[in-house]
Image: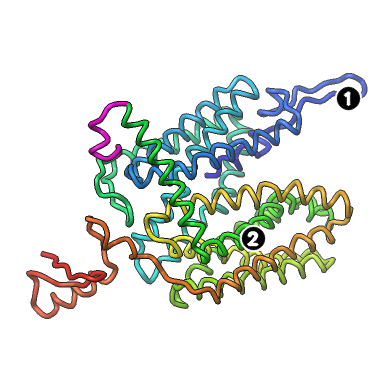
Amino acid sequence: MDSPRAISTNGVNGSPRSCTESNVCSDGSGIQGEFDLSNFKDGILSSAFLVGLLIASPIFASLAQSINPFRLIGVGLSVWTLAVVGCGFSVDFWSITICRMLVGVGEASFIGLAAPFIDENAPVAQRTAWLGIFCMCLPIGIAVGDVYGGLVGDGLGWRYAFFGEAILMLPFAILGFVMKPLQMKGMSNNIIPGFLNEELSKKDFSSYVSFTSNLLSRFGQDMKALLSEKVYVVNVLGYISYNFVIGAYQYWSPKVIYGIYETENADLLFGGVIIVGGIVGTIGGSVLLDRMNSTIPNAFKLLSTAAFFGAIFCFSAFCFSSLYVFLALFLIGVILIFAIQGPVNFVCLHAVKPSLRPLAMAISSVSIRIFGDVPSPPLFGILQDKVDNWRTSVWILNSILFLAAGIWFIGIFLPSVDRYEEDSEHLGTRVEQPDVTPFLESKMADGDTTSAVYKGKGKTKRLL
């Protein structure tokens, strides 16, 4: 469920207090009415979670090298659950704003850790598809958040919408602490499950100060190594351009559709297109990359092609005065645009060595927020104020998708190495090899059930 989306629904967010010319006043409804929020403060409240998200994402990614990732996710989801409960008990604008920031801290634990875990544990032939399913949660979460926030907020009150979310998340927070810790590639193997490494846990407070200093130093080194990866940098630059367009679309499209086609069902139509196009596009693009053979050059080919033709269809959709022609073309464009989700995350994960994957995902997420979907809605609003023509404004916005396509097209020609197994031989941990099961099966078929030998990177291992 998308918490930021639920808070923006009419049932939860509500409407501000207002008075008529005859001094007849209404109390308003929801959060905005109860706390007497202006539209400016209401906008701050909606995006406050980004503060915690942007600050905490690289911190969680760095800690993942010293603390078991599942325990970090458990901590993050616990913070998220408590923060959502705090939103329900908030008494004024500042209290709910602080809780909203803490919601972002909780979400940060997932950003850098979930995708690497999924990529490492998915079947080799379906890695991108599994990532696509994970990415598909975004449009589904938006849809569920819209429905949930409206129903619960209108029926029971906005506070109960937060309490319900906390109850639904609590089991997942607990699972983060009780599930058997799994070792991720590139991470230290000297780990006490859920805590710092053994050497540090035996020392006094001064050691924690030293640990923090070392952590910051390592973070700087990791950032330098990450930014030296040209493939990763090009991929993120394209992703920023892409999210700049997506952010403006998500916020402004209902108003754009209403302004051009004068339909009262703009919210419903746009929501339906996003749900259908998001699911079909995300799964379709991910499966297609798996069928093409999941390599970094193939991913860039798919990214540039999908962005280019998605831009053409979205651009063309707004050229027609017929609402039905617009919806048909726009749906195709949305499918192509969402086909990018799986491949772009595949490149982020496979362009860097395993120990940098959590940080790579965190920096990618932070970058697309700061430079992409956070500034684009107000900038599009400024553009519309100057141009005063919805079609022209959207055409200008769509042109940025061509920029994204061009950046990803450059990535096709960059020397690239899939670094999926790069750190494996340097660690004392057991790394699952994707071809073990078929080889074991072939051995058993030959009557050898006592042992089977398979080859790792630069060494031979034996399974008993």
Image position, residue 263 (x, y; %): 81, 54
Instruction: Specify the quadrant of the image occupied by residue 125.
Output: bottom left
Query: What number is the disc on residue 242?
Result: 2
Residue at 41% x, 69% y is 418
146 w.r.t. 12: above or below? below
Classify mark 1: helix, strand or loop.
loop
Near mark 2 (Cα within 10 A), the count class, few <14, some 14-19 or many ≥20, is many
**Residue found 75% across the figure and 65% down from its top:** 399
Name the N-terminal-most of marks 2 and 1.
Answer: 1
Taking the magenta stretch, the answer to whether it contains residue 200 is: yes
x and y, in percent, of residue 371 in the image = 65, 51
- The secondary element bearing badge 2 is classed as helix
Location of residue 223 with respect to 232 vertically, above or below: above
Q: How many marks?
A: 2
Residue extent of the magenta highlight: 194-205
* Nearer the observer, 455 or 90: 455
Distance Cα–Cα, label 2 vs label 1: 43 Å
Q: Pointers 2 and 1 in contact (CB under 8 A)?
A: no
Q: Does 458 sit left or right of 49 as displayed?
A: left
Kindly identify the residue that appears in the image at 43 percent across and 71 percent down. Answer: 417
Is residue 293 rendered to the left or right of residue 152? left
Please indicate, yes or no, whether residue 277 appears anywhere in the rendered image.
Answer: no
**Amino acid tagged 2:** Tyr
Tell me the amino acid under the disc marked 1.
Thr
Tell me where residue 35 appears, x and y as whole percent. 68, 23
Which residue does the numbered mark 1 point to in the structure image? 20
258 magenta-colored: no
- Tell which of 65 and 203 is nearer to you: 203
Q: Residue at x 72, y 66 (%)?
A: 314
The answer to which quarter of the image holds residue 438 is bottom left
Point out residue 273 in the picture as x, y percentages from the top left corner. 66, 59
Colour basis: rainbow
